[in-house]
Image: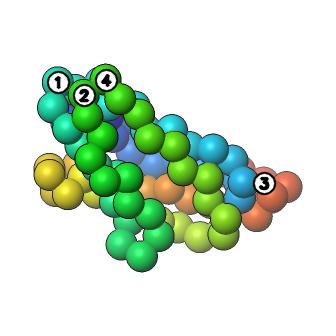
């Protein structure tokens, strides 16, 4: 999270991988995917970690800045990444 954007905006990981969102902006953000995950408030210079337990495609937004959008793609362990 930097420049009021998720960087990268799209990320592919495997089930069980840890994903860390780091807030490099001077104000809070969230990483919120309805029904899948919600970081709650991530303060400036703080981070939040999520470990997906299921494969799928999870679009997410910052609830404070709805123009900030990203997609987390989760593949089954051992599946090829694209």
The residue positioned farthest toward the right in the image shown: 78
Secondary structure at badge 3 equals loop
The residue beneath circle 2 is 44
Quick check: 16 above or below 18? below
How many angstroms separate mark 1 from mark 4 (CA)? 7 Å
- Label ID, residue 49: none
Secondary structure at badge 2 equals loop
Q: Contact (CB < 8 A) between labels 2 and 4? A: yes
Quarter of the rendering containing residue 43 = top left
The residue beneath circle 1 is 26
Q: Nearer the viewer, residue 77 or 40?
A: 40
Q: Contact (CB < 8 A) between labels 2 and 1? A: yes
Q: Earlier in the sequence, mark 2 or mark 1?
A: 1
Quarter of the rendering containing residue 3 = top left
Q: Residues within 10 Å of mark 3 (few under 14, many from 20)?
A: few
Image spot of residue 34 (x, y percent): 36, 72
Q: Earlier in the sequence, mark 2 or mark 3?
A: 2
How many angstroms separate mark 2 from mark 3 (CA)? 34 Å
The residue beneath circle 4 is 45
The residue beneath circle 3 is 80
Quick check: 39 above or below 43? below
Q: Earlier in the sequence, mark 3 or mark 1?
A: 1
Image spot of residue 78 (x, y percent): 85, 55
Q: Residues within 10 Å of mark 4 (few under 14, many from 20)?
A: few
């Amino acid at each position: 999270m930097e420049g009021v954007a998720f960087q990268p905006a799209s990320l592919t990981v495997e089930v069980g991988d840890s994903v860390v969102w780091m807030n490099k902006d001077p104000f809070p953000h969230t990483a919120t995917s309805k029904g899948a995950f919600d970081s709650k408030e991530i303060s400036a210079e703080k981070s939040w970690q999520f470990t997906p337990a299921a494969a799928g495609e999870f679009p997410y937004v910052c609830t404070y800045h709805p123009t900030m959008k990203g997609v987390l793609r989760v593949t089954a362990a051992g599946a090829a990444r694209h």
